[in-house]
Structures are given as C-alpha cells and as structure tokens.
Amino acid sequence: MDDWLNRTARRRITRVTVSAGALLGAVLLAGCSASGTTTSSTGTSTATTATSTPTPTSTVTAAARPTPTVSGTPVAGPSRCAVAQLSGAIGERNGAPAGTGDGMNQKHDAIILTNTSGTTCTIQGWPGVSLVGDGNGTQLGAAAALDRTTPHPTLAIQPGGKVQAPIDYTSAAVYPGSQCGVKQADGLRVYPPGSTASLFITAKWQACTSTTHDLLTVGAFVTYP
C-alpha cells in the first residue's frame, strides 16, 4: 500500500515538472519571436537587422551673372533747322548772275536759306512752296510740284551758312485768262522740310488763281554755291 502511494506521488511530481518545463519553453520561444528572430525550417535562428541607407542629396548653386554696364555718353548732333533760325530769299542758282538760264516766260532760280542763328543745324529734303497774295498770305493756285529726281542729302548749315533748292517758274501769262485767272502774287510761302511753320519770301511773280496749271517746280536742298 505504501509502495503504491509512493509511485502515485512520484508520477504527479513528474507531470508537474514536465508541464512547468513546457510552459517555460513556450515563454522563451515567444520572447525570441518578439525580439525580431526568425526560425528556419532546420531550427536555426537567424537575427535580421534593418539597415537604413541615407539618400544622397545634390546641391545646385546658380552662378552669379555680372550685371552689364554701359559706359560712355551719346554725343548729340546738330538738330533740324527751325524757322526761327532761318531767313529766305530768291536768288540765282549757285551764285550765278541774275537772269542766267531764264527764258521769255520762265525763271530758273533758287530758294536760298541762310542760318541766322549761332548754332549749326541740319536740313534735308524738299521744301513746301506756294505763291501767296491778297496782302494776307492767301494761297494762289497750286502748290509747287516736287522734282524728286534731284539729290537730297542731309546738310549741316553752319552759322551764316547757306543752302539752296532749285525752283522753276512758268509765268501765268502763257495761259488763257479764262483758264488761269491771272493775279499778281506778293511772294512765296516756304515750309522748310519737316516744318509746320513757314517763311515768307518776296517775289513779284504772276500767279493763277486756278489750280489747273502747275506754275512751280522745286527740287531738294543742296549746298550753296
């Protein structure tokens, strides 16, 4: 009886010991799994460590561009002649004697402009010209036709210097009175090139009150004489 009790007690102690060992093994296995180890099919544990690789960065530096500089001061040239700087007259071309080249009813003269100011100025192109009368500058007949076959350089006129524009005039007397309407002119109204102001030049030429006939033809300004 005593032997049976002893054997029964020893079996219980063994089962408790085995159960405690199994429980301790399960706890250890769970701890290993939680610590980041993996178990291979062969029972070997291998630790896995994640390594962070830094991403390379690039820095681009913009090169500083030099600020362009402008040196020097533009030199201003002579300005265009204003009416206030000029005086006008009718004269012979190139300083020739009076009446040179004139016909019975024609004149071949020049409009001569003089720089009366103290500074150099420039002139270029054709003047606007018309005969005027009635003592008040009323235009008589058609304005002068422009002879565009003549040279038209830009001319610098020194103080006291002169330029000339050739002008051809046909007398109104060559046309029937009914077609022309002859009238004595007081002179010429002359607009320098590019100007809206004009000069008056005395010229006792006959004009047509009709615009049917062109009595005047003018060329561009050239040097004088």
Image (spheres, rainbow, N blue to C red):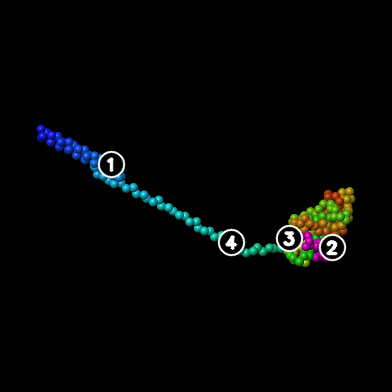
Q: Which residue is mark 1?
A: 30
Residue that appears at 57% across and 60% down: 68
- Position of 157 with respect to 55 (left or right) is right
Dot 2 or dot 3: first in sequence order is 3
Tell me whether circle 4 and circle 1 mark residues in contact (CB < 8 Å).
no
Residue that appears at 82% across and 61% down: 90
Q: Is residue 154 visible?
A: yes
Q: Which residue is mark 2?
A: 99
- Crowding around mark 2 (Cα neighbors within 10 Å: few <14, some 14 to 19, many 20+) is some
Q: CA distance from mark 2 to mark 4?
A: 62 Å
Q: CA distance from mark 1 to mark 3?
A: 106 Å
> Does the segment drawn in magenta span residue 60?
no
Tell us which disc is closer to us: 1 or 2.
1
Q: Which residue is mark 4?
A: 69
- Position of 172 with respect to 54 (left or right) is right
Residue that appears at 77% across and 65% down: 117
- Crowding around mark 3 (Cα neighbors within 10 Å: few <14, some 14 to 19, many 20+) is many
Q: Is residue 101 visible?
A: no
Residue that appears at 78% across and 61% down: 84
Tell us which disc is closer to us: 1 or 3.
1
Which portion, as a residue range, is magenta? 80-100
